[in-house]
Image (cartoon, rainbow, N blue to C red):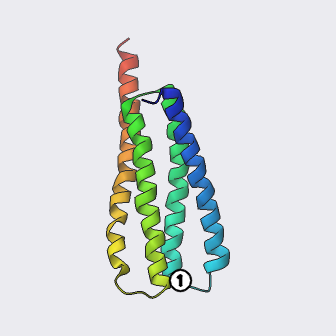
Amino acid sequence: MKTAYHMHKGFIRAGALFALLAVALGAFGAHSLKGKISTYALDIFQTGVTYQFYHALALCFTGMLFEKFPLKTMQWAGRFFIMGIILFSFSLYTLAAFKAAVQPGGNWIGAITPIGGFSFLSGWLCILLACRKSAANANSR
């Protein structure tokens, strides 16, 4: 089992990697895709980039909080953010690729996106619960 030290560093590393990818994908979308794919497909792609970047930062934030509050709920927050980025953002990138290629039948990919959104919500809820638990523990001392 990973120690608290390794876990928080892992969340920060994963957040930095996802942020790096979000910047690269955002630049790719702005410079290589603009004008070459429909505005609709580009908007889908950009939504994926935006949410990936926000939650990459949330993952770094979770790593910093986990160092101070090494609780299971904080650990789950980081896991949910990682799942959310993969399921939400990457499903949108795939959906945008289908739309850009004008391929029929790719709409099923959009059904994955809300699962990723639910993962994001779960991550934020876990942070809220971890902070409440930490506050309750501090008040009981």
Q: Is residue 61 left or right of residue 76?
A: right
Q: Position of residue 127 (x, y in %)?
A: 41, 38
Q: Quadrant of residue 99?
A: bottom left
Q: Is residue 86 left or right of residue 46?
A: left
Q: Residues within 10 Å of mark 1 (few under 14, many from 20)?
A: few
Give the x, y percent position of residue 52: 51, 58
Compared to 88, does 121 lie above or below? above
Q: Position of residue 59 (x, y in %)?
A: 51, 45
Q: Is residue 98 above or below residue 126?
A: below
Q: Residue at x 56, y 35 (%)?
A: 9
The answer to whether one can see residue 65 in this image is no
Give 61 or 80, whichever is nearer the viewer.
80
Amino acid type at circle 1 is Thr
The residue labelled by disc 1 is 39
Q: Is residue 21 left or right of residue 137?
A: right
Residue 104 visible somewhere in the drawing = yes
Quarter of the image where the N terminus is located: top left
Instruction: Classify 107 as above or below 65.
Output: below
From the viewer's perspective, tell me whether residue 128 is left or right of residue 54.
left
Kindly identify the residue that appears in the image at 35 percent across and 35 percent down.
129
